[in-house]
Image (tube, rainbow, N blue to C red):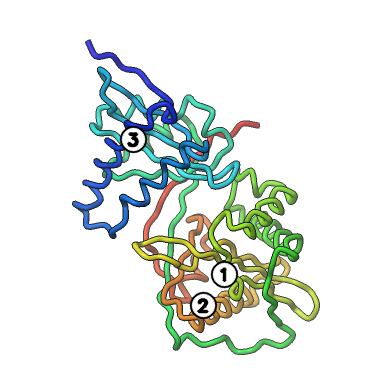
Amino acid sequence: MNKIYFQNINESLEHLEIFFADITRIWEERKGPEGIEKILAKKIDLVKDGTIKGHILFDNNQPVALAWVEFMSPYYGNMLLHCIDEEYIPAITNKIIESSLINNAILEVIQFTDTDQYHQLFRAADLFENIRQRMAIYIDETFSFPDEKPFIFFEEAGSEHVDISSKISFDAHKVSKDYEHYVELSELDKRQALEKRLYTGSYGKVIRPATLLMYYEDTPIGACSVVSTSCWGMEDVPWVFDLSLDPKYHGQGLGKHLMQQVLAILANAGYTITGLAVTTSNKSAIGLYEKLGFFKVDEFSEFTRVIS
């Protein structure tokens, strides 16, 4: 008879190498970019300091399934699930569902095998699902600055502008409703706290020249923040962390104007690609990005259990 049991990953660090080896094998078979081993190895320290929490499933003392949650902030992160054999998917997924790790935390599902079982089990448990897509645009030195608009000015944003930029973002996302159940965006003070973490490097190094406030005369009406990240097999990719426009100024082409300014700055600095993520229900934002030349790279789901 099989003996099935779970252990916290911080009590079973030596067993993570089995899963890392299997993930690396799959990654290499699919000809993913080099460096997956280094990325996985760095996760050990995050397990030790509590940034990553989760469980390993054992069958007759053999580690067979892994599920962990990595928090980038108190209420946001990703959820990696990996099984040596698919028969263990229900057990490890239900272990995460039953835990408190997903309570009010928006978590992107990370997996390395082609199965929809994880998503099906999350949906069957009535977890809230937010579907998003990553988009990218190729830029070069020929990408020009937008034509000037009367009374529109730009200023490089910094930590001293947190109250301004977070208020613009908070008001904009209240209208778009694309961040439903995101605890950190549900109240203005929480949005301000998130913005403060941005400037500590919690989400990647801030690319200051492209992190902007846009003004109409003396009134700040738009904000964009850009950080450096590693993705798509490349280092130092500019990532649009947030782009927001005061709802009172919607429909005037000003969101496009702001993004064009940001992209021109990045192109002028020598960057060749820029990425972002957007909720698929936000059709107006997707339409804007597509008009600028962004294209869809992939789609992913975020899940949470809403606890009032």
Numbered label tally: 3
Residue under label 3, please give it. 16
x%, y% of residue 181? 60, 43
Label 1 SS = loop
In the depicted view, which residue is nearer to us: 258 or 198? 198
Classed neighbour count for the residue bearing mark 2: other residues with Cα under 10 Å, few (<14), some (14–19), many (≥20):
many
Which disc, if any, is residue 207? 1
Name which of mark 3 and mark 1 comes first in the sequence: 3
Q: Disc 2 marks which amino acid?
A: Leu
Query: Which quadrant, please, contains the C terminus?
Result: top right
Label number found at residue 266: 2
Cα–Cα span, label 3 and label 1: 34 Å
- Other-residue count near label 1 (Cα within 10 Å), few / some / many at <14 / 14–19 / ≥20: some
Q: On the rendered structure, is 70 left or right of 166? A: left
Distance between mark 2 and mark 1 Cα atoms: 9 Å
Quadrant location of the N terminus? top left
- Left or right of 46: which side holds 1? left
Q: Amino acid at mark 1?
A: Ile
Do the CB atoms of the residues marked 2 and 1 lie less than 8 Å apart?
A: yes
Task: Say whether marks 3 and 1 touch (CB < 8 Å).
Answer: no
Residue at the spot 58% in from the left edge and 37% down from the top edge: 104
Left or right: 227 with respect to 270?
right
What is the spatial separation of the Cα atoms under label 3 and label 2, in whole angstroms? 39 Å
